[in-house]
Amino acid sequence: MSLPRRALLYAALPLSLSLVLTACPAPVTPTPPPAAVCPQSTGTTLMTQAVQSPVTAARVTPDWTAPRVVGRVLVTGAAMQAQGLSALAGVQTLALADGLTLAVTPAGQSDEAFAARLSAAGLTAQPDFLYQALANPNDPGVPGNGGVAVTGAGTQTQTYLNRIQAPAAWTFLQGCGKTPAAATTAILDSRVENHADLAGRITARASFLTPDAGGSDSTTGHGTAASGLVGAATNNRLGLAGVTWTGPLLAYEVLGSQGGSTSSLTQALNEAVRQGAKVVNMSLGRILGPNEAATSSDQALGTALTNAAKSAVLVAAAGNTAGDGVYFPASHPDVIAVGALGASDTALACYSARPSTARPRPVDISAPGGAGPCTGATNATQMLILGTGNTYTLQAGTSFSAPLVSGAAALMRAANPALSAAETKARLLGSANQTTAGLPILDVNAAVRAATR
């Protein structure tokens, strides 16, 4: 049975344009403490008292907020004096080398406070710092690697990853002993095609298309591109790196060749919640009419959004016209509306939706979406994304900004599963960088640090 033609249709939000392609007694062996943590700065650092030793007279203030092994300190220096030895009475110790002793922090004390007590007794104590291999992902598209060939555009890299501080976020998470993994993320979009760079990432597929949608959209690769930005398989020596390296993606088809309906989106949202999605990406939307309110124009979808937001972070593309306000569902109060940055991080791209006189609702956050036809557009300022048939291509649009934000939210909820959807949303938006004009810009590194505080 076909739906009435007045059913609301939603469309994908890539930017429709032809890109101009122009030329990132004995010692006791201690019980091992927890191996890796994410210590966070509290804003005040207790300064250990520097003590002159036969080795050095330098004053040392260790960084106790850096990644380290929790539950122990290292005592350094020459032979300990009687005063220092008395400070270690009853403490588990292990001599590691001449002048280097591991001391287990007594129960009820912080490592920093224990070190301060040892320092006051004439000893020099420091954290047992954690070190990591300094290797970027080996995917060619990651800035600093060889790049990916794009037909008609030479070799390109994912410059947008550096702009959103994704590599710094990955380094931070690895330093905490965590993989840059995604919490379960649902992609509500067109059909996600098989692509070598999505191998192992798509854990469930379902189609919610209605007859009005005109059948599967197998030509644009829109859903494939959105999925790749969130989670292209990473460290596989192939193509691109996703914001998340591993973790389950749910590919839900809601957009056909003629768009998608309220009924499709509502069913997909409900299924995402049933399957435990912690993040939902919607790179789609429609312009609200002059008499429509964001909270009541589509009550069926609005109810589904409100219910889904209780357990999932909802992210949507803001829209691709600058004079019509933020599209729906991005304009819904329970959804994070994502605007697009163009060639620079100082203002929204010329095509990005933004507040209008009639619709003053602002974007919540912005992320690179490609310069499109805007001033300063080059191949390097467009979005390098997964294409059809195991290829890679350049495009622009808020459709490609939203998945970067969804990827950040997925990293946050995987790094700290105790965070609720509301807490994740608040920390994500609160960690954004602000331009002088007040435009909030995605900072993935700041977001994951905020999540693990």
Image: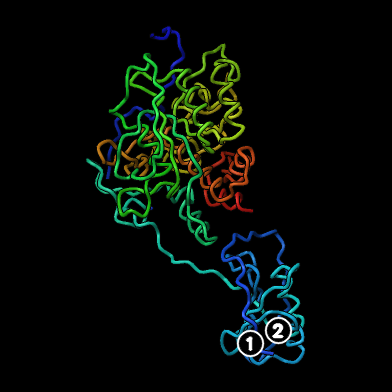
Vertical comparison of 289 with 155: above or below: above
Vertical comparison of 54 with 262: above or below: below
- Residue in view at x 48 percent, y 43 percent: 407
- Residue in view at x 58 percent, y 25 percent: 332
- Residue in view at x 51 percent, y 38 percent: 366
Where residue 21 sits in the image (x, y, percent)?
A: 27, 39
**In front of the other: 49 or 118:** 118
Vertical comparison of 134 with 365: above or below: below
- Label 1: which residue? 77
Q: Secondary structure at mark 2?
A: loop
Name the amino acid, label 2. Leu
Where residue 360 sits in the image (x, y, percent)?
A: 60, 24
How many marks on residues?
2
Vertical comparison of 73 with 266: above or below: below
- Residue in view at x 69 percent, y 73 percent: 105
Q: Is residue 178 left or right of residue 102?
A: left
Mark 1 or mark 2, earlier in chain:
1
- Label 2: which residue? 123
Name the amino acid, label 1. Gly
**In front of the other: 322 or 57:** 57
Q: Is residue 11 left or right of residue 151?
A: right
Q: Secondary structure at mark 1?
A: loop
Cβ atoms under marks 1 and 2 closer than 8 Å: yes
**How busy is the neighbourhood of tag 2: few (under 14 within 10 Å), some, or many (20 plus)?**
many
Q: Which mark is residue 272?
A: none
Where residue 352 sits in the image (x, y, percent)?
A: 46, 30
Quote the CA–CA distance across marks 1 and 2: 8 Å
**How busy is the neighbourhood of tag 1: few (under 14 within 10 Å), some, or many (20 plus)?**
some
Where residue 396 sits in the image (x, y, percent)?
A: 37, 35
